[in-house]
């Protein structure tokens, strides 16, 4: 039962009661409600048997974070223990923590604050901030993206939409000569079938790797792959304009529905500008 907010619980139970009255309630509805509230399915069935009545709250009211608590959390890069030490120092009248004075804006915000246990603050931050928000203050934008929800895209017809990704692989490769390197990989995936249409590897990012993957996906060559078509749209999942791959922007952002592309698709002729390249960047 812990973790289920009373207002959310009442709303969910009321909706389930409506479904039950309309004879549309199923076990899948109860399972989904249990997952959303963080309780067991048995608990949700027990709430349904009691109707929409919400049990009276027992114990003290949960601690609600103040704006000063949130500002201190951001200042300490997501360290709740540091926030608690600074707050306790202000409450005790010391005004210093770890040998350094607490910033003036935090002392003003906590001027009339009451003592709060460390565990209480940890529970409050976990309850009021989403995992993505906590990761953003601790790690940065990369942490927020890693903890964010990735929505499913609508199903597409085969060959209509492609996804391109150009990134440096998080692995080390030992070449015959020189130092270990992290290779770059370009991939093209069909949204409708999740099929890998084209790919290329290179020791450094350049336009040749993008062109090689594009040619593999565009041109039908039975010796290479059974695929080959021109999509109506290309989605860049990791845009090459960022970081050290800015030179590939003009290549990857090509208009998939251009007149030349349509002529290539209708005649089956290979596009002379999309020349295959080896992994070292030289033309074959």
Image: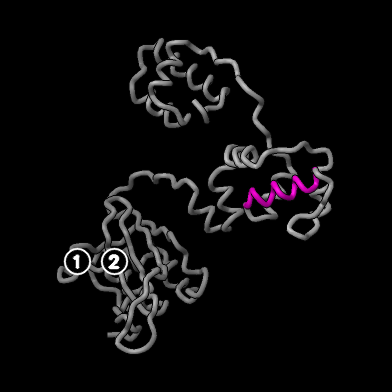
Q: Give the range drawn in magenta.
A: 79-91
Q: Give residue 152's quadrant in the image.
A: top left
Callout 1: SS = loop
Q: Residue furthest left?
A: 223
Lateral position of residue 68 relative to residue 218, left or right: right
Query: How far apart are labels 2 and 1 at the CA level?
Result: 9 Å
The residue located at (19%, 66%) in the rendering is 225
Pointers 2 and 1 in contact (CB under 8 A)?
yes
Q: Residue 59 carries which label?
A: none
**Label 2 belongs to which residue?**
198
Callout 2: SS = strand
Q: Residue furthest bottom?
A: 177
**Closer to the camera in the image, 264 or 35:** 35
Q: Give residue 258's quadrant in the image.
A: bottom left
Magenta span contains residue 222 = no
**Majority secondary structure in the magenta region:** helix
Q: Give residue 102's quadrant in the image.
A: bottom right
Q: Is residue 186 above or below residue 112?
A: below
**Closer to the camera in the image, 272 or 143:** 143
Lateral position of residue 209 relative to residue 223, left or right: right
**Closer to the camera in the image, 225 or 152:** 152
**Label 1 belongs to which residue?**
225
Quarter of the image with the C terminus is bottom left
The residue located at (33%, 45%) in the rendering is 155
Q: Is residue 73 above or below residue 213?
A: above
């Amino acid at each position: 039962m812990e973790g289920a907010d009373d207002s959310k619980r009442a709303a969910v139970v009321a909706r389930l009661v409506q479904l039950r009255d309309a004879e549309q309630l199923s076990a899948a509805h109860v399972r989904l409600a249990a997952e959303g509230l963080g309780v067991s399915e048995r608990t949700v069935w027990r709430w349904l048997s009691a109707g929409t009545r919400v049990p009276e709250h027992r114990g003290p009211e949960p601690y609600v974070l103040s704006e000063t608590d949130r500002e201190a959390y951001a200042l300490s890069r997501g360290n709740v223990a540091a926030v608690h030490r600074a707050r306790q120092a202000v409450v005790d009248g010391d005004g210093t923590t770890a040998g350094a004075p607490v910033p003036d804006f935090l002392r003003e915000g906590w001027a009339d604050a009451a003592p709060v246990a460390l565990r209480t603050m940890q529970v409050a931050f976990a309850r009021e901030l989403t995992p993505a928000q906590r990761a953003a203050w601790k790690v940065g934008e990369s942490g927020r993206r890693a903890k964010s929800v990735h929505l499913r895209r609508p199903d597409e017809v085969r060959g209509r939409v492609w996804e391109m990704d150009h990134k440096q692989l998080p692995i080390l490769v030992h070449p015959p000569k020189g130092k270990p390197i992290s290779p770059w990989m370009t991939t093209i995936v069909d949204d409708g079938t999740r099929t890998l249409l084209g790919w290329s590897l290179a020791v450094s990012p350049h336009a040749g790797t993008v062109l090689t993957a594009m040619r593999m996906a565009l041109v039908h060559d039975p010796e290479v792959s059974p695929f080959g078509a021109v999509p109506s749209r290309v989605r860049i999942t990791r845009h090459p304009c960022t970081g050290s791959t800015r030179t590939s922007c003009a290549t990857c952002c090509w208009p998939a529905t251009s007149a030349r592309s349509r002529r290539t698709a209708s005649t089956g002729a290979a596009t002379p500008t999309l020349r295959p390249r080896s992994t070292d960047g030289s033309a074959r």
